[in-house]
């Protein structure tokens, strides 16, 4: 059997992107990925004029607006559900003014992650009777947990969204996207699904950065999407 001279190119975990979106109770429809462009919003404002809304955005969803001119970041937390055709977002009073042209990715990226581990386990039942020579095992069911280790920052929309989901017993929609396998692809494999936030931990020690870890019990995992080739 022929073998390649070199091993297949490995995928760097460092290039992985995780996104988190808050879901309405009882509904499991993945939101459309989009970019929201803001008009100027003053410090203390409770509304942001935006373009680009294509899916409902739930109350409690956090967003991170980024100004491309100087890479400055601005956190906004939606306080009233926005319709898919919305031209403005009602938000908690802004701690900082948002400049015109700042852009937020929706669903937003979970910031400062150092791991994004999906762990699936299957429960089995052992079948062993006196009239057979060998044992057998029957699968009973499986469960998947999504563990996200990382560091705390006030500007992390993933943390704020997961905390809101946990406190209000709401599901979230998550994605995990690998970096492209090589230069012929624009992005790597995508894993996604829905889940419940079962833990948000924030260890805070004197000699280290404040940490932030989140555990998600996956309630439904969607089919994986293969890497996207460059046209």
Image (tube, helix red, strand yellow):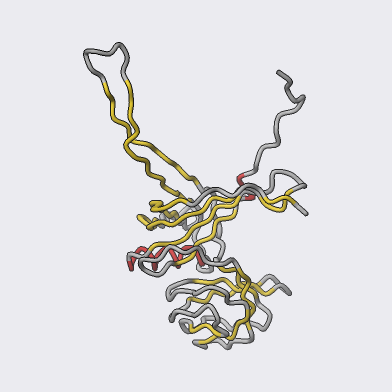
| Quarter of the N terminus within the rendering | top right
**Residue 14 to residue 72: above or below:** above
Task: Single out the residue that lies furthest toward the top.
Answer: 133
171, 223: nearer the viewer: 223
Q: Which quadrant of the figure has residue 132?
A: top left
Task: Single out the residue that lies furthest toward the front.
Answer: 131
Left or right: residue 132 compared with residue 38: left
- Numbered marks: total: 0
Q: Residue at 73% x, 22% y: name it.
A: 3
Left or right: residue 8 compared with residue 58: right
27, 168: nearer the viewer: 27
Q: Residue at 53% x, 77% y: name it.
A: 84
| Quarter of the C terminus within the rendering | bottom right
153, 134: nearer the viewer: 134
Q: Looking at the picture, how far across and down is residue 163, in whole percent?
A: 40, 65
**Residue 130 to residue 193: above or below:** above
**Residue 27 to residue 129: above or below:** below
Q: Looking at the picture, how far across and down is residue 18, in whole percent?
A: 55, 56
Q: Looking at the picture, how far across and down is residue 180, in whole percent?
A: 69, 48
61, 29: nearer the viewer: 29
**Residue 7 to residue 220: above or below:** above
Q: Residue at 26% x, 19% y: name it.
A: 128
Q: Which quadrant of the figure has residue 26?
A: bottom left
């Amino acid at each position: 059997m022929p073998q390649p001279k070199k091993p297949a190119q490995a995928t760097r975990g460092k290039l992985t992107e995780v996104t988190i979106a808050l879901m309405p109770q009882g509904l499991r429809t993945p939101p459309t990925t989009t970019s929201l462009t803001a008009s100027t919003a003053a410090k203390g404002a409770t509304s942001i004029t935006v373009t680009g809304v294509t899916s409902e955005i739930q109350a409690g969803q956090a967003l991170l607006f980024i100004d491309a001119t100087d890479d400055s970041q601005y956190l906004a937390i939606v306080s009233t559900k926005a319709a898919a055709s919305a031209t403005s977002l009602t938000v908690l009073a802004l701690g900082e003014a948002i400049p015109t042209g700042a852009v937020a990715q929706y669903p937003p990226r979970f910031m400062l992650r150092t791991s994004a581990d999906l762990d699936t386990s299957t429960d089995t039942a052992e079948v062993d009777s006196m009239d057979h020579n060998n044992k057998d095992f029957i699968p009973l069911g499986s469960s998947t947990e999504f563990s996200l280790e990382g560091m705390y920052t006030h500007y992390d929309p993933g943390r704020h969204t997961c905390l809101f989901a946990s406190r209000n017993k709401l599901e979230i929609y998550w994605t995990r996207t690998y970096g492209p396998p090589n230069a012929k692809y624009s992005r790597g494999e995508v894993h996604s699904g829905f889940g419940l936030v079962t833990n948000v931990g924030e260890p805070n020690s004197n000699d280290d950065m404040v940490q932030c870890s989140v555990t998600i019990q996956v309630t439904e995992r969607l089919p994986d999407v293969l890497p996207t080739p460059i046209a």
